Image (spheres, rainbow, N blue to C red):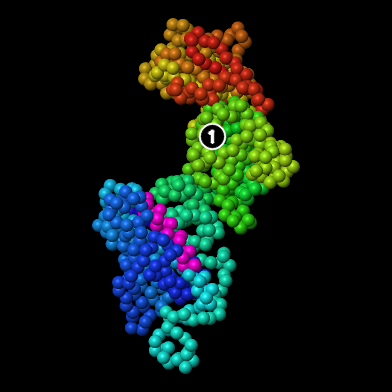
Amino acid sequence: MVQKYQSPIRVYKHPFELVMVAREKRFPTCPQIPVFLGSEVLRESRSADGAVHVVERSCRLRVEAPRLLRKIAGVEHVVFVQRNVLNWKERTLFIEAHNETFASRVVVKENCSYRVHPENEDWTCFEQSASLDIRSFFGFESALEKIAMRQYTANVKRGKEVIEHYLNELISQGTSHIPRWTPALAREEDAPSQAGQREPDSLEVCGPSNAQDLAPESVSTDGDKLDADYIERCLGHLTPMQESCLVQLRRWLQETHKGKIPKDEHILRFLRARDFHLDRAREMLCQSLSWRKQHQVDLLLETWRPPALLEEFYAGGWHYQDIDGRPLYILRLGHMDTKGLMKAVGEEVLLRHILSVNEEGQKRCEGNTKQFGRPISSWTCLVDLEGLSLRHLWRPGVKALLRMIEVVEGNYPETLGRLLIVRAPRVFPVLWTLISPFINENTRQKFLIYSGSNYQGPGGLVDYLDKDVIPDFLGGECLCNVPEGGLVPKSLYLTEEDQENEDQLWQWRETYHSASVLRGAPHEVTVEILERESVITWDFDILRGDVVFSLYHAKQASMPGPREPGARASGQLMDRGWALGANFSCVEAPLICREGESIQGSHVTRWPGIYLLQWQMHSPPAHVACSLPGVEDVLTALHSPGPRCKLLYYYEVLASEDFRGSMSSLESCTSRFSQLSAATSSSSAPSHSSSLVSR
């Protein structure tokens, strides 16, 4: 594989002629670069008018490699041939270099250029590129590649420092200006008036240069190239190879991407997320750009307006900045009814809101960069978990959370600078066990978790937040305007009738189904189980009326052909002639569910076959029986007016090994935020099952 290096534009704030003189002082030897053993001129020529000077040198560089590798290679130094074309008239220097040693096994090419800064003729720009192609090297190709790139990039930075060293040396000796080249004829004609002028390769003692001292913001080079000073000032310190990756990826986007080119800060985040592996970062960035275009994310801040319900019950918001100048976002997760929010606005709306928070975070980072005068590319999140309970850890909610983590990790990498988790309750390790495998390792290292009151005092929040921005609810003196959250009224939960947008309805049905239950016409869902010890899990809310929930098992369906999960009551009942205990059995005793309750449960199946989840309207105790209504009863109920119950439900089938340790297998929890009491009944079959009731 060919390794490439591409530098950004480096600017010397000195005239081209002075930089050329300083550069010549590097030859024939350069003590500041120990690996440079020396050089000799092979060929030299000048144009007739003296404007173009061509020099070809042979340079010897010491091999900094393990002794074994040097012994196998049989060399202690390598030879490079360097061709310099200096044009005094155009004020340019182009350098081409290649290796002579091991040229059949290793191909190294380097190109450098010096030219006048396009916006300030008294400044000089330098640009450098190189490639390394190791075709064969005694079986040590990988080791040689690492050594060569490490040594090369170390000397890249050193090269700029050497030029600066000789420039300072010239200026300290009183030489700060070299006259520009003029044609020989003009010099002869103007000799009387320019008697003091010398040849371009001689030195002249002169006063300070009259170069304009442009403000940093106004310094730029070619519009499609990056300036090293700009990188340091606006993006932060990068190693030469990191700079090279940024320059190469940005150039590739300019040449191939047909849409809007992302900002340099945005590109850099993807490089950091992939440890500056150029190909992996490019793939990740391209996928994200396609995603942004598909979902019109660039317009999100202009078009997104959160529903009033979110503004009232979503307990999160921006709150000043941390001690490092990062924007600070506070999320009172323990006080937020995540289950209620998801059922009231839907998963897609919540995801849209999370994306708007991330977009706003990037915008605030840019603002803080300008405000504080230093690169700020990430934000800090403070999560308060007081009140976290099993209400937050229901399976559909965890699945939605994992999806949101996946979207954010894939499209907003390296935007989170620090995550401060305070007042973590005893149930938190369970949640962490579920979600941590889906969080990038680089992101996990930014998590700081405090239980109880450990966040107070030294080593706590005061190490990351100024005292005057610590929220009042965490013992600080700063009033925090983040909404307090609270329970979302079940009357605000969405039903199918509430949905007007078909796309939104489709997304909603991906998670929850709504159903109406009439007297004598239960709502049923059939599930086909192929392997014993599979786990059926359910979660439902009773929005209106009281219902009885039951779970049945049958060895076979009453009608031929496959039975699709989610079948409705009409025409989907088991055979009326079947008898309880003979053709089917009740594996979960009937559970009476009152209006307003939330029920979670699971059943570990003992046998394969058809399982039926059934909700029917609650009747007086004498009429509640573990039996199935007949077809005539159902048809009569469907065509007869009368009361109906409404519910939202979710179900899923899991393999036993996937179920163990999941949130659905937890049976009870009590917290200040919600009360969950176990309402578990034993069935005739010795299976593991449970249902949770949350009032």
The image shows residue 107 at horizontal and vertical percentages of 30, 58
Q: From what the image shows, is residue 690 above or below residue 89? A: above
Horizontally, residue 485 falls left or right of residue 498, namely right
- Looking at the image, which is closer to me, 96 or 71? 71
- On the image, numbered disc 1 is attached to which residue? 401
Q: Is residue 521 magenta?
A: no
Residue 60 visible: yes
The correct choice, above or below, for 275 with respect to 234 in the image is above
Where in the figure is residue 233, as x and y percent of width and height?
55, 59
**Quadrant in the rendering for residue 558:** top left
Most prominent secondary structure in the magenta stretch?
Answer: helix
- Specify the amino acid type for callout 1: Leu
Q: Which residues are magenta?
A: 145-165
Secondary structure of the residue carrying tag 1 is helix
Q: Position of residue 542 (x, y in %)?
A: 60, 23
**Residue at coordinates 28% horizontally, 60% vertically from top-left?**
101
Name the one closer to the observer, 245 or 602: 245
Q: Is residue 545 visible?
A: no
Q: At 72% from the left edge and 38% from the top edge, which residue is drawn?
A: 475
Q: In the picture, which quadrant includes the C terminus?
A: top right
Residue 182 position (above or below residue 477): below
The single residue placed furthest to the right in the displayed view is 477
